[in-house]
Amino acid sequence: NAGVTQTPKFRVLKTGQSMTLLCAQDMNHEYMYWYRQDPGMGLRLIHYSVGEGTTAKGEVPDGYNVSRLKKQNFLLGLESAAPSQTSVYFCASSYVELSAGGPYEQYFGPGTRLTVT
Amino acid sequence: QQPVQSPQAVILREGEDAVINCSSSKALYSVHWYRQKHGEAPVFLMILLKGGEQKGHDKISASFNEKKQQSSLYLTASQLSYSGTYFCGTELQAGTALIFGKGTTLSVSS
C-alpha cells in the first residue's frame, strides 16, 4: 500500500497563475481533507470531503476549490494564486465508523511545498 | 473554534516528564493527538472519546476532562525520539472534521 500520496512535491507559481494539487489514497477511506500549514499557525483545514461527490468548507476555504469525483482522489485547485497562499499543503484521509465513535486516525500525505511569487 | 494548546514550547532532558494541554471553549466529542517531526507529515498518536477511558501506549498517555473541555498529553521518561511538534485536534460532533491547535514544540536533549 502506498497510503496517501500527493502530487507535486514542490511548486513555484507566479501571482495569478492557477494549479491543481492531487491527493490519492489506496486505503478505501471515506473521508479526505486538505490542510495548509504555516509557521506558528498549526494545521488549518481548507476543505474536506465525507464521500465521493461531496465536499465541505473548512476554516480557511477562500481562494481554493476542491473536487472528489472518485473516492480515492481529492483535488485542490487554486484559480488565481496569491503570495498569501505560499504554504505547505497536506492531504489526509480517514475511515469512519459513526456507530463506534466517528472518524478514526487520519493518515497524512508527505506534503506539497508551494511558493507563490 | 481553534483549540488552545499550552505551553507553546517545552525543553527537556532525556528521562524528564512533560504535560501538554489542549483546551476548547466548546463542548467536545473527541480529541485527537498527533506528532510531527521536522520536515515530515503528522503522525497519529491517539484518540480520546467523550465518555471514554484514558488512553496510552508505551510512555505516552492522555486524558480527557469533559467538564473542563480539556485534554492533556503526558510524556513520561522522555526519549530523544519524542522531539517534535505535538498537535491536538478537536471534534465537536461525531463525523465532523477536526480543528487543530497551533501545536506545542517539544525538544529533548541528551
Image (tube, coloured by chain):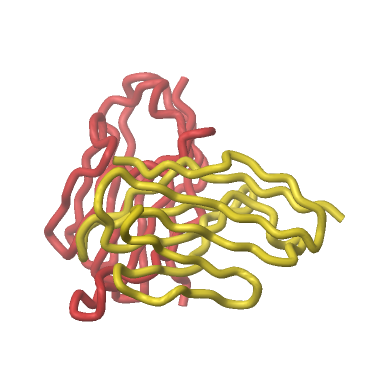
Q: Is residue B72 found left or right of B108 in the rendered image? A: left
Up the image or down, A34 lies above or below B60; here it is above
Q: Is residue B63 found left or right of B69 in the rendered image? A: right
Identify which residue is drawn at 51% across, 47% down: A9
Identify which residue is drawn at 24% across, 44% down: A58
Identify which residue is drawn at 23% across, 31% down: A62
- Residue B71: give x, y in percent of width and height: 44, 57
Note the chain letter of the yellow one: B
- Residue B29: give x, y in percent of width and height: 26, 62
- Residue B3: give x, y in percent of width and height: 38, 44
- Residue B35: give x, y in percent of width and height: 55, 57
Pick the residue in front: A29 or A18. A29
Q: Is residue B96 found left or right of A1 in the rendered image? A: left
In which image quadrant can residue B47 be found?
A: bottom left
Note the chain letter of the red one: A
For the N terminus of chain B, give its image quadrant. top left
